[in-house]
Amino acid sequence: MRHNFGAGPCILPQEVFKQASRAILDFKDGLSILEISHRTPEFEAVVAETEKLIKELLNVPEGYSVLLLQGGASLQFAMVPMNLLPDGQTASYLETGVWANKAIKEVAAFGKANVVASSKESNFTFIPKEYSIPEDSAYFHYTSNNTIYGTELFDVPSTNIPVVCDMSSDIMSRVIDVSKFGIIYAGAQKNIGPAGLTIVIVKDELLGKSGRKIPSMLDYKSHADGGSMYNTPPVFSIYVAMLNLRWLKAKGGVAEIEKENIAKARALYAEIDRNPFFKGTCAVEDRSRMNVCFVMENPDLEKAFLKLAEDNGIEGIKGHRSVGGFRASMYNALPITSVHTLIELMQIFAEKQQ
Ligand SMILES: Cc1ncc(COP(=O)(O)O)c(C=O)c1O
């Protein structure tokens, strides 16, 4: 059996894969989901249900639009300032990792980025807490989960200006209060579905205020007005996301999956803290539930542990090159039994060394 701890694109439920493959062969009257027009009533129903499920699962209040876009979270790094930041004005950013840094870099084409705090000096092993957000910034941007470094910010920073959040790697993993945000965006390829789809949840009152002429494809308003059908949407990615969100709903929704995610993270961090051969890489209070980063006390043993893990069906735990060691990504679809398998292997490895 394989246990997929990959950071993304990542594990999705097996039943979703089965349903998706059936729709490739026959979605409607013998036609594949890959060959039907996105303008058919059947596919329009898929878009409508996907949006409805996102709204339901995240309890999105009135006054927000859910957009199904393309271009990944990386395009959002540029679309956010393009749509929200008037020429020459300032937007504030919290720098907690490479993705936050990439978002900051994109601001220069439109205005100024004010970095309120950064943990770069310590290779992003913690989330800065002491900073103030200037009220004259157009918006404040942060990354809720730092996929590479394994830190997560659970409380929405308090400010009166619109809060923009890159939630690519923890959306749908825990309950959030959408009303605290101006924009939430996420590449779909973690807890939502396959790559190729990007989710944007935008407060309608923020649209059309930059005073800038924006190309239609990059203007949130075109997509909001066009019901995410301004152009041909990523049909298959949306369909699989719908199946995955149905799966999440049937499991009891985000509050239920959050309990499982807490249990999975607690179990693995407990072993990392207990087992003398391993240690965590981040500040304990900022530890991510989605991406657990850890190294070995003796780095010379890492190769041998990786081999033991891979020989026993563990996939994708090699750490990102900028952190080293291991990263166990534990997205919604990863069963706790996979986490138990990894923990057992850590214990077996430690016993063998003694
Ligand atoms: C937090 C975060 N933001 C942004 C990105 C970039 O996303 P994309 O590849 O969809 O552009 C990633 C990718 O892993 C990520 O984890």
Image: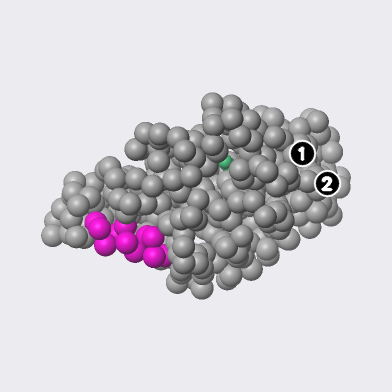
Determine which residue is flagged by label 2.
130
The residue shown at (81%, 51%) is 284
Ligand 1 located in image quadrant: top right
Q: Which residues are magenta?
A: 43-53
Q: Name the foreground residue: 70 vs 83.
A: 83
Q: Going by the picture, which residue comes out furthest to the left?
A: 29
Give the SS element for disc 2: loop
Marks 2 and 1, the one that precedes in the sequence: 1
Determine which residue is flagged by label 1.
117
- How far apart, in angstroms, are the residues tagged by discs 2 and 1? 8 Å
Viewer can see residue 20: no
The residue shown at (28%, 42%) is 231
- Is residue 158 rendered to the left or right of residue 208? right
Q: Is residue 305 magenta?
A: no
Query: From what the image shows, is residue 276 above or below residue 213?
Result: below
Give the SS element for disc 1: strand
What type of secondary structure mainly makes up the magenta span?
helix
How far across and down, in percent of the image, does residue 38 sit?
22, 50
The residue shown at (59%, 27%) is 108
- Is residue 298 rendered to the left or right of residue 320? right
**Label 2 CA crowd tier, 10 Å (few <14, some 14–19, many 20+):** few
Q: Looking at the rendering, in which quadrant would you find the C terminus?
A: top right
Viewer can see residue 178: yes
User: What amino acid is labelled 1 in the image?
Assistant: Ala
Figure colour scheme: one colour
